[in-house]
Amino acid sequence: MATSTCFPGSNPGECFWQNQPHELHNFRSTEQLPEQSEVVIIGAGYAGTSTAYHLLRDHGDAIKSITILEARGACSGATGRNGGHLRPDFYGHIPTYIDRAGVRAGAEIAEFEISHLHAMKKLIEEEQIDCDFTLTRSIDVWCNEEAAQKAKAVYDRMKSLNLDYMNDVVFYTGKDVEGICGVKGAKACASFTAGTMWPYKFILHLLKSALASGKVNLQTFTPAQSITPAPHGGFTIQTPRGSLHAATVIHANNAYVAGLLPEYAKNIVPCKGICCRITVPAGTTAPLLNNSYINRTEDNTLSYLIPRADGSIVVGGASSKFRPFKEQWYNNVDDSELIDAAKDYYDGYMQRTYRGWENTGAKVDQIWTGVMGYSYDSNPHIGAVPGKEGQFILAGFNGHGMPVIWRSAQELARMVVQKIPFEETCMPRLFQTSQFRIDRAMNGSEDDGDILGTGNFPSTKP
């Protein structure tokens, strides 16, 4: 049995998105674990469910059986606890990737993420998925003058690279900024196309669809404790409810992969975040907000926010408030406890941040925490696990999995079934897991990586 502490906590705190658990939340397809399964997927969140869905939809004839093992309830982890954004990165971290690996490698990531908006919109419409999906503009706001000038310089640099997708971005400076974005004290703002949604409902719809195929066995509250090579090929997966045999194993448990793949312990680290729902008193109409937001205060505290049709707001972030208290968030899997240094930050947030909200009586209705998988170099790890033939990984999304996982899972399913190398998929090259990346984090210091430090590790340019 694994001795790692990198396993989900047994008692997650309540969360708005999951106040009314789906019928599949604690579902088990069979009373007993199946003795064997062609494919075993570890994790019934966004990555695991999407992979199962694509294996069936795109390769159904080739797939006989899939078992999904979930340590807790279906989609009870980060995806079921996030901020509701489907927001591609146009220019935030992309310049860093460009500096490390070249313009094309950085642009690949932005273009891949943007493609998720259209792919998921199409799917949601075709399957009539009830998940409150909205196509909107996302507004970036800077209230610190120096930060605003730096942001404008980044925008100008990205425009100068002649990347087509940047045509969707508009950047505002000057006296009208506050009136454009509605945020008090705004010095600059930018906007581009993005989406908002109810991720838990989206994932549970996909899971229900996969189960309807008759080829998927879902086992909730059944953590995978260890994986060992079986004598005659494949793998034996041990759980508290017995073991099962798999020909192929897909690690889709994001923050917790190091529990079963210890070589990833420094590559993908569980990190906590905080999020809340703000409501106005009954009988009060909330001022209309049409866009999703990333707000940065004058002291550069970042929050991400979506408005909901019922007038409520979902907002989270504030990492700069808790970042100095490493033990409260870093390498911490306890999503039953709020982050002490940030738990009061969103009291009065709407009143102090937005024009017209001063007398609304808006207050925090529910607040929760979630555990995300942050990676040493800010990129997910996707593909064949080095040195472990038959095992694959789809993890390490840095709190940014919504515009990354859907198509990555589709491509990973191709790798599994068609036995193609990562290089023949449509995924950005920087997403490929590799022994090089594993070793770089294992042998490097935490302070050189992107999670805690400066990102000073050697360039990834070939």
Image (cartoon, rainbow, N blue to C red):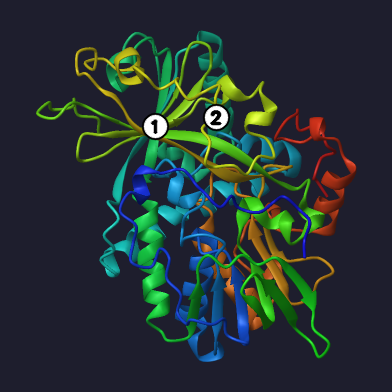
Is residue 244 shown left or right of residue 453? left
The N terminus, quarter of image: bottom right
Q: CA distance from mark 2 to mark 1?
A: 15 Å
Q: Nearer the viewer, residue 349 or 431?
A: 349
Residue denoted by label 2: 339
Q: From the top left corner, tell me how far across and down residue 119 is, in percent.
A: 40, 61
Q: Is residue 291 visible?
A: no
| Mark 2 vs 1, N-terminal side | 1
The residue drawn where x is 51% and y is 64% is 44
Q: How many marks?
A: 2
User: Is 283 placed above or below 78 here?
Assistant: above
From where the camera sits, is residue 223 visible? yes
Compared to 119, does 146 lie above or below? above
How packed mark 1 is, by other alpha carbons closer than 10 Å (few <14, some 14-19, many 20 or more), is: many
Quick one: SS at disc 1? strand
What's the residue at 60%, 43% (across, down)? 398
Residue closer to the observer: 346 or 155:
346
Does 26 sit left or right of 37 as displayed? left
| Quadrant hosting residue 443 | top right
Crowding around mark 2 (Cα neighbors within 10 Å: few <14, some 14 to 19, many 20+) is: many
Image location of residue 417, percent across then percent down: 62, 82
Which residue, as the protein is rendered here, is positioned at the far left? 283
Q: Give x and y (percent) for residue 17.
A: 35, 48
Foreground residue among 283 and 431:
283
Amino acid type, callout 1 = Val
**Where residue 149 appears, x then y in whole percent?**
54, 14
Indicate the amino acid at tag 2.
Ile
Q: Nearer the viewer, mark 2 or mark 1?
A: 2
Residue located beneath label 1 in the image: 315
